[in-house]
Image (cartoon, rainbow, N blue to C red):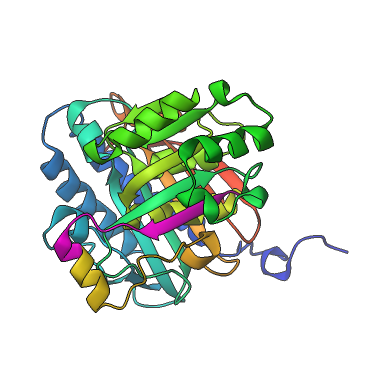
Amino acid sequence: MSHFPPEIQGEKLTPPHHPGLGLVRVTEAAALTAGRWMGLDAASDADHAAQDAMAAALNLLPMRGTIISGEEGRLHEATPLTSGSSIGAGEGPEMDVELNAIDGAGLVSEGVPGAISVAALAPRGTMWDPGPAVYLEKLVVDSDVAPHIGPEALDAPPAWTLALVARHKQKEIRDLVVFVLKRKRHEKLIEEIRRSGARVFLRGDGDVAGALMAGYRGGEVDVLMGIGGSAEGLAAACAVKVMGGEILGRIAPQSESEKAACAEAGLDTGKILRCEDLVRGDSMYFSATGITDSVILDGVHYHGSIVTTHSLVLRYETQTRREIKTEHRLK
């Protein structure tokens, strides 16, 4: 008896469609485009070029996709990847789509490590829609800590939360590394983390990359703390859920206008969201491709007519984590 499923038996081999492997071509397209802008001090131009490349690649996927939280909230202008836009080839399954053509445009602009391109897919109606909520307060941990952490950790003093993380990772607090975005709003948080004895991994950009590092068991980062983009939090939730980690998130308006928009939309700014609230069910795909070198992924590298990329592909249904290194031969 054959051990292969029916669709790959017989003379004609037709492997089942894997949306995640199609999705990696999307993040590769954005990364390949963004890589050309590395170190040119042109963050906005890099962002726009990468978005155009990502949109074109997405439109080749056999799906009827809808972008949940697009790039316009962060960039304050219309983009090819605007919230609510239809994306895909117009045939196939209905999907929710979350993406960030460049997670860390400032890093690309300066030519420093840590920038990636990310995209996630899930069946239509399973992703949380943040609407006008641009920012989330977040806490991200890996699978060692996930079963033991509850909503109270988001309101507790950082030292209490870090003690809990250290206990379940079987580490001393001084051995912990905490990822925090370098923002003025985080000055008190950073001070409290340092006072606890933990070490701080500060980065100017790269919210999704930080969540990936914190959510990966045995990685370089133990926990992510602080306020970042809600769109980035939604994309990260897809990855962290596949890895067995946990995200705690709460809407955190950073202006009176954002606060008023959230109230008008009926969003509960006091509710603490978990991974399962951000993306429901057991069918989701996530892809990330490095743009500049980072802890988790190599960046785009140019070798004459050959360009190399390094990508991460996650699938919840099969609990698989793939790393893909690709050579792209330029014509």
**Is residue 255 in the magenta section?**
yes
Q: Which sits in the foreground, 241 or 161?
A: 161
- Residue occupying the point 72% across, 66% down: 10
20 over 200 or under it: above or below: below
Instruction: Give the extent of the magenta segment.
Output: 245-258
Q: Quadrant of the C terminus?
A: top left
- Residue occupying the point 49% across, 46% down: 156
State the image coordinates of residue 311 (x, y, percent, origin top left). Answer: 45, 40
For the question of whether residue 307 can be seen, the reply is: no
- Residue occupying the point 23% across, 26% down: 111
Q: Quadrant of the N terminus?
A: bottom right
The reply, left or right, for residue 76 in relation to residue 121 is left
232 over 142 or under it: above or below: below
The reply, left or right, for residue 207 in relation to residue 127 is left
Q: Quadrant of residue 8?
A: bottom right
311 over 122 or under it: above or below: above
Q: Which sits in the foreground, 23 or 178?
A: 178
**Is residue 249 in the magenta section?**
yes
State the image coordinates of residue 169 (x, y, percent, origin top left). Answer: 66, 33
Q: Residue furthest right?
A: 1
- Residue occupying the point 72% across, 65% down: 9
State the image coordinates of residue 172 (x, y, percent, origin top left). Answer: 62, 24
Q: Which sits in the foreground, 269 or 55?
A: 269
The reply, left or right, for residue 300 in relation to residue 52 is right
State the image coordinates of residue 217 (x, y, percent, origin top left). Answer: 61, 37
The reply, left or right, for residue 259 in relation to residue 276 is left
For the question of whether residue 319 can be seen, the reply is: yes
- Labels in figure, total: 0
